[in-house]
Image (cartoon, rainbow, N blue to C red):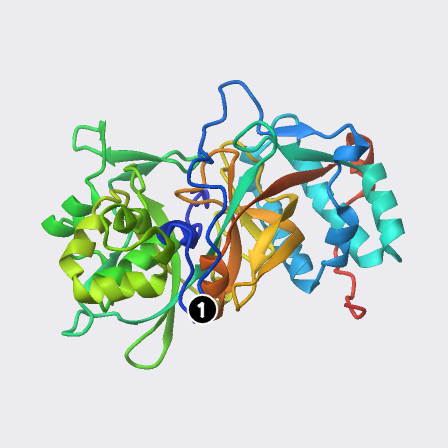
């Protein structure tokens, strides 16, 4: 849910914390109909691609529906990806399976122009299908099935100093944590002799207090800290009334495990009742038992502080945009480009709704690995928590890139087009 190439974090899949649940509210979230038997995290077979170009018009996605659902947030997300492409560091990730950096950036500029200037749905679709190739994800099953979960940025009370109330720390990134400089994948802990070893587990880090002195901020309890770990980002209301914005700065190489699944497995919660509200209730009643299950998630996340105008940032180091930013596995999918997501989502009453949108692939995550997984960013705070917690549905994922013969037509503009009509 790791790159930022990776100074920032990607936000993590909230639905995986809850199994398939939601955050509270009177009405229960929908229970997944497929799912528990499907291996959505099935790795991509060696030597194969996660994308296949569509050549049969009958297999094209619903471009008209996505056009109809466009909004100004999509244009803002395109601007954020263009900021990333403008940075020289973005060039190291291309070419990606034949897609060049110039082609990927020009694809954004072309889509931006089509969205802003197309006089009608018909004109948009005609120009898009003439100028773009459309690729479909192979999904977890080779037939294009992708599981879409949701994530968000929570808001918590916190203190820069330890107090009687705030006793659970979030830590700065330690200097001995090693990650791949290109992919951002964690590699382990650098030893005194220059070697590598697995980083200590969550239990070992917390019980030994080995990182004492590198605390970034303090939260009220272990569950709040854990939720920030799972989401990878948070807005914190400090004791003086000011706000602090934090985001991902790295993670260990240890495996991730879902707290919700562990609570259901051990009988602390029933499969159908795994929500953030129920997790909090059990934690208040049996904090030690829940803490033991948290330790089953051996992975540990580190944080840094952000300026409010740069937060929340995804794995590209640019701001993510609600319902317009997607997290995928960056080892198999290209960064920063236009995607089309066709799945189901929920509203604030947990009623199911169609989710058919152009989005930007701008993030990644600890549980978002393999072609069968993707994570939709739902926003900040309690309302986004509801949408993220209820997001658990299969769907289709498509990537759009300019055909090579159209790349030269699109140059980075010096000034933006006015969006008075939006």
Q: Quadrant of the N terminus?
A: top left
Task: Answer yes or no: is residue 334 visible.
Answer: yes
Farthest residue in the left direction? 208
Q: Residue furthest top?
A: 47
Q: Is residue 194 above or below residue 251?
A: above
Find residue 353 and report its image quarter: bottom right
Q: Is residue 234 above or below residue 340?
A: below
What quarter of the picture does the C terminus occupy? bottom right
In percent of width and height, residue 373 lies at: 50, 40
- Position in image of residue 186 (x %, y %): 34, 36
Circle 1 residue: 381
> x, y (%) of residue 296?
23, 44
Of 164 and 140, the residue lying toward us: 140
Query: Dot 1: within a 10 Å radius of its alpha carbon, few (fewer than 14), some, or many (20 or more) residues?
Result: some
User: At x 69% / y 58%, what residue is drawn?
Assistant: 75
Residue 217 in view (yes/no): no
266, above or below 169, in the image: above
Q: Residue at x 15, y 44 (%)?
A: 204
Left or right, residue 70 beside residue 168: right
Report which quarter residue 355 is drawn in.
Answer: bottom right
Q: Vertically, is 165 above or below 334?
A: below
């Amino acid at each position: 849910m790791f790159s930022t190439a990776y100074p920032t974090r990607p936000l993590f899949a909230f639905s995986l914390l809850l199994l398939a649940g939601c955050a509270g509210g009177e009405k229960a979230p929908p229970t997944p109909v497929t799912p528990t038997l499907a291996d959505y995290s099935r790795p991509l077979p060696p030597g194969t691609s996660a994308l296949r170009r569509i050549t049969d018009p009958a297999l094209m996605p619903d471009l008209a529906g996505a056009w109809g659902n466009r909004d100004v947030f999509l244009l803002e997300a395109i601007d954020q990806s263009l900021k990333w492409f403008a940075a020289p560091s973005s060039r190291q990730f291309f070419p990606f399976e034949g897609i060049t950096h110039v082609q990927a950036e020009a694809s954004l500029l072309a889509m931006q122009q089509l969205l802003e200037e197309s006089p009608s749905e018909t004109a948009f679709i005609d120009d898009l299908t003439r100028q773009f190739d459309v690729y479909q994800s192979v999904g977890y099953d080779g037939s294009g099935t992708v599981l879409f979960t949701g994530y968000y940025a929570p808001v918590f009370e916190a203190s820069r100093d330890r107090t009687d109330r705030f006793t659970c720390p979030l830590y700065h990134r330690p200097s001995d944590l090693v990650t791949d400089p290109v992919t951002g994948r964690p590699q382990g802990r650098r030893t005194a002799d220059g070697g590598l070893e697995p980083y200590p587990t969550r239990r070992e880090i917390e019980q030994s207090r080995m990182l004492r002195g590198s605390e970034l901020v303090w939260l009220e309890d272990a569950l709040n800290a854990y939720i920030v770990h799972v989401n990878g980002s948070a807005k914190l209301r400090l004791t003086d009334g000011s706000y602090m914005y934090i985001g991902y700065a790295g993670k260990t190489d240890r495996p991730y495990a879902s707290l919700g699944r562990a609570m259901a497995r051990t009988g602390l919660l029933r499969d159908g009742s795994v929500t953030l509200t129920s997790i909090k209730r059990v934690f208040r009643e049996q904090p030690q038992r829940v803490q033991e299950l948290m330790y089953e998630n051996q992975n540990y996340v580190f944080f840094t502080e952000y300026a409010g105008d740069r937060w929340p940032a995804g794995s590209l180091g640019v701001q993510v945009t609600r319902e317009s930013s997607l997290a995928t596995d960056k080892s198999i999918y290209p960064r920063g480009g236009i995607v089309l997501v066709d799945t189901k989502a929920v509203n604030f009453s947990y009623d199911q709704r169609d989710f058919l949108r152009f989005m930007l692939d701008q993030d990644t995550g600890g549980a978002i690995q393999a072609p069968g997984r993707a994570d939709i960013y739902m926003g900040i705070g309690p309302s986004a928590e509801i949408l993220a917690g209820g997001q658990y549905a299969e769907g289709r994922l498509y990537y759009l890139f300019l055909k090579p013969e159209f790349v030269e037509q699109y140059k980075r503009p010096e000034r933006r087009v006015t969006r008075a009509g939006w």
